Amino acid sequence: MKIVMLGAPGAGKGTQAKKIAERYNLPHISTGDIFRVNIKAGTELGRKAKSYIDQGALVPDEVTIGMLMDRIHEEDCSNGYVLDGFPRTIPQAESLTEALQREGERIDRAINIDVPDEHIVHRMSGRRVCTHCGATYHIIFNPSSREGVCDLCGGELILRDDDRPETVEKRLQVYHEQTKPLIDYYAGQQVLKTVDGTQDMEQVFADIQAVL
């Protein structure tokens, strides 16, 4: 079962991707992880990616696709995988489709976690992250026992710049321009399933299980 996760930043893609991976015993694959592994291992593609990253430039799609195809043909992906954070644009999706077709493969399901923008802004601006251990909380949905203090290590909890309302709104604008068109792309391939991401996390997962 080859799955692509879709949804706006803050919709809960990463959380649900991990739950799917655990439930169905599939590897959870993010491009960030692939970059880190290849750069650390000093692979040819990793060196290419690092040269772009070091210049503050975007890694070209062909380099990312190359690393992704290497990853999904490792032994642990023999029964499928969950892609989280890729593709982000129509050209990336088309490149992925073409690369898979050359191997006689295809994406089986694209799961779109649908959350309205106002929910995203409210959800992300309430997030707090521990500066010491990285644990995450939410001032409404998952507060720490003591305000501003991590339950796990006693570290300080902060609102990251990425989670400030003005930053979230800019990220959502980019999402609507570049990534949201993927919903229509995968609908056209008849593999899209949409679930209501405003529900309780466990109910969202139950709905995902129902469409899988």
Image (cartoon, helix red, strand yellow):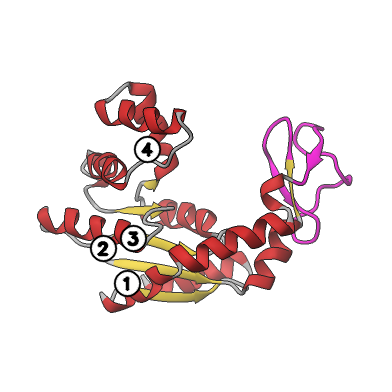
Could you classify mark 3 by the number of other residues whose Cα lies within 10 Å: few (under 14), some (14-19), or many (20 or more)? many
Please give the name of the residue rendered at 28% of the width and 78% of the height, measured from the top-left corner.
188
Mark in the foreground, 3 or 4 = 4
User: Nearer the N terminus, badge 3 or badge 4?
Assistant: 3
- Tell me the SS state at disc 3: strand
Q: Is residue 138 magenta?
A: yes
Label of residue 60 in the image: none
- Tell me the SS state at disc 1: helix
Q: CA distance from mark 3 to mark 4?
A: 17 Å
Mark in the foreground, 2 or 1 = 1
Q: Position of residue 81 (x, y in %)?
A: 32, 52
User: Nearer the N terminus, badge 2 or badge 3?
Assistant: 3
Q: Amino acid at mark 2?
A: Ile
Query: In the depicted view, which residue is nearer to us: 135 or 19?
Result: 135
Query: Which quadrant would residue 106 be assigned to in this image?
Result: bottom left
Q: Amino acid at mark 1?
A: Tyr
Q: Main secondary structure of the magenta part?
A: loop
Q: CA distance from mark 2 to mark 1?
A: 9 Å
User: Nearer the N terminus, badge 4 or badge 1?
Assistant: 4
Q: Which residue is mark 4?
A: 34
Please give the name of the residue rendered at 75% of the width and 36% of the height, measured from the top-left corner.
152
User: Nearer the N terminus, badge 2 or badge 1?
Assistant: 2
Most extreme residue toward the right is: 146
Q: Are marks 1 and 3 in contact (CB under 8 Å)?
A: no
Q: Quadrant of the N terminus?
A: bottom left
Q: Amino acid at mark 3?
A: Ile
Q: Are marks 2 and 3 in contact (CB under 8 Å)?
A: yes
Q: Amino acid at mark 4?
A: Ile
- Tell me the SS state at disc 2: loop
Could you classify mark 2 by the number of other residues whose Cα lies within 10 Å: few (under 14), some (14-19), or many (20 or more)? many
